[in-house]
């Protein structure tokens, strides 16, 4: 089978190798670009729909390789029944990404010689083992303290739910059953065993995959009830050689969702930057994010977007329909009634040393709107024959310089290079008497 790009799962897992143009709402500017997850290589994405103790988790990830080589191991808080596992629609993750991505907007200055107009504003609102192998497996389970508590085939996946008493036994069991577990996995498995968590193990059923007709694997969804509101990211670090990016779309009927065991901070936003960034927005956002990440000592969760899913301003993509929300896992929808859905987009860049604990979350009643938004402001270029016009032109020089300094501060880029790209002259000193007798 030829290599394909697998659109599956998930940062919170060991990804074990087997032997294994958007429309815009009316606002006082124009949406022009967005910084979606395509900026990041191998960014993991999860959707968490949560109300009370009930969670519906959708896991997606970019995995590149042979379908037959793919498998995952995910700690789960409860023993899942087959009916609690589902195959998701990969387009829903793309829709949420597009809807909540940090965005670049542009405004156009009015003629300073005409009276200002009041702005009304937009509304804000694998094949199973043979019988003899099974006997052998049972013997191993007894010895290693590993129990197969359930076994399902869901869509193109063969799924096992494992219970384990010892991490060494679980690691040995996985290796004996064809999972190429990274060195050190045992140490990371032990905390989940102490918490009496189960292990969701999935690999691809090639026969079922061929039947689907898809070129890529689809996301896995699981529904469960547990007081634990968390993502087990530590296990995924076993595979990691470098920093990993996680985008979590948390959907709640209440309000914002925060990380409780690491600081949650808002990404820098609402900054005016030079016009040329319009053609380099992807590079700008990556540099800006990296600068903010370093400034926060590499151990925070960034909030990139919080909003009611019924509206947006500006919209980088249309709000999801009720049917799309349902596909995203929103289980509290009822027809003909108002069903609040609030989204929090969290971006976490993590490493083993900076994130020694799994991510713990809490819902809040805070419904404040926030978005990562960056502003281009075009100057007025028409004729200006009035005192206000002359004052406006003098102010433009200062404004352009402030935009340069803002961009340098956000990204760490060289000021001289920014001025050159922005086509600004080096800043000149103003004679002191100009402040006495302005010309």
Image: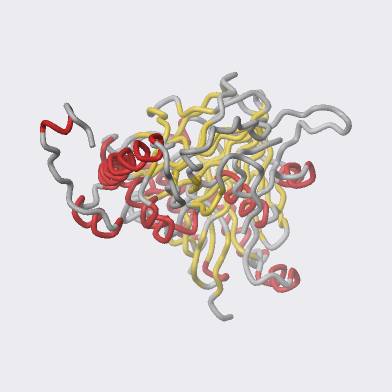
Give me the residue at 60% from left, 30% from top: 118
Query: Residue extending furthest top?
Result: 365
Q: Nearer the viewer, residue 339 or 120?
A: 120
Percent from the top left, x then y, of residue 32?
53, 53
Specify how the rendered protein is coloured: secondary structure
Left or right, 338 with respect to 435, comes to right
Q: Quadrant of the N terminus?
A: bottom right
Closest to the observer: 389 or 243? Answer: 389
The C terminus lies in quadrant? top left
Residue 79 on image: x %, y %? 65, 38
Total labels drawn? 0
| Residue occupying the point 59% across, 23% down | 367
Q: Is residue 111 left or right of residue 341?
A: left
- The residue sitting at 54% across, 33% down in the picture is 115
- The picture places residue 403, in percent across and down from the top left corner, at 32, 43
- Using the image as rendered, state which of residue 7 and residue 308 is in the foreground: 308
Q: Quadrant of residue 358?
A: top left
Q: From where the camera sits, is residue 353 visible?
A: no
> Relative to the observer, which residue lies in front, 377 or 429?
429
Q: Position of residue 251 (x, y in %)?
A: 63, 35
Give me the residue at 57% from left, 49% from top.
Answer: 97
Q: Residue furthest bottom?
A: 2
Tell whether 212 sits left or right of 302. right
């Amino acid at each position: 089978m030829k290599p394909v790009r697998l659109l599956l799962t998930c940062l919170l897992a060991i990804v074990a190798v087997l032997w294994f143009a958007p429309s815009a709402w009316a606002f006082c500017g124009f949406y022009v670009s967005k910084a979606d997850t395509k900026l990041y290589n191998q960014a993991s994405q999860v959707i968490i729909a949560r109300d009370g103790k009930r969670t519906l988790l959708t896991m997606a990830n970019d995995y590149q390789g042979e379908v037959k080589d793919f498998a995952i191991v995910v700690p789960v808080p409860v023993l899942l029944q087959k009916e609690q596992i589902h195959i998701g629609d990969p387009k829903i993750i793309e829709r949420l990404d597009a809807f909540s991505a940090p965005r670049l907007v542009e405004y156009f200055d009015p003629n300073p010689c005409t009276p200002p107009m009041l702005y009304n504003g937009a509304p804000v609102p694998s094949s199973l083992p043979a019988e003899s192998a099974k006997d052998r497996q049972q013997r191993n389970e007894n010895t290693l303290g590993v129990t197969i508590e359930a076994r399902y085939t869901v869509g193109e996946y063969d799924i096992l739910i494992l219970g384990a008493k010892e991490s060494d036994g679980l690691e040995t069991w996985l290796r004996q059953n064809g999972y190429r577990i990274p060195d050190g996995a045992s140490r990371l498995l032990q905390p989940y065993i102490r918490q009496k968590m189960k292990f969701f193990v999935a690999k691809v059923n090639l026969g079922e995959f061929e039947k689907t007709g898809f070129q890529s694997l689809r996301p896995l969804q699981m529904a469960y009830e547990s007081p634990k509101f968390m993502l087990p990211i530590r296990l995924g670090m076993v595979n990691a050689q470098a920093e990993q990016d996680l985008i979590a779309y948390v959907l709640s009927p209440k309000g914002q969702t925060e990380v409780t065991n690491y600081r949650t901070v808002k990404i820098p936003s609402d900054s005016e930057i030079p016009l040329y960034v319009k053609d380099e927005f992807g590079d700008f956002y990556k540099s800006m994010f990296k600068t903010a990440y370093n400034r926060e000592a590499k151990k925070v969760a960034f909030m990139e977007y919080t909003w009611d899913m019924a509206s947006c301003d500006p919209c980088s993509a249309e709000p999801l329909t009720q049917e799309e929300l349902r596909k995203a896992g929103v289980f509290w929808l009822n027809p003909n009634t108002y069903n609040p859905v609030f989204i929090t987009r969290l971006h976490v860049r993590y490493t083993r040393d900076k994130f020694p604990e799994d991510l713990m979350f809490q819902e809040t009643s805070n419904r404040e709107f926030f978005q990562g938004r960056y502003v281009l402001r075009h100057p007025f270029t028409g004729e200006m024959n009035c005192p206000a016009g002359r004052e406006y032109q003098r102010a433009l020089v200062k404004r352009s310089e402030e935009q340069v300094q803002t961009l340098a501060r956000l990204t760490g880029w060289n000021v001289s290079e920014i001025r050159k790209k922005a086509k600004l002259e080096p800043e000149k000193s103003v004679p002191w008497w100009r402040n006495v007798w302005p010309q």
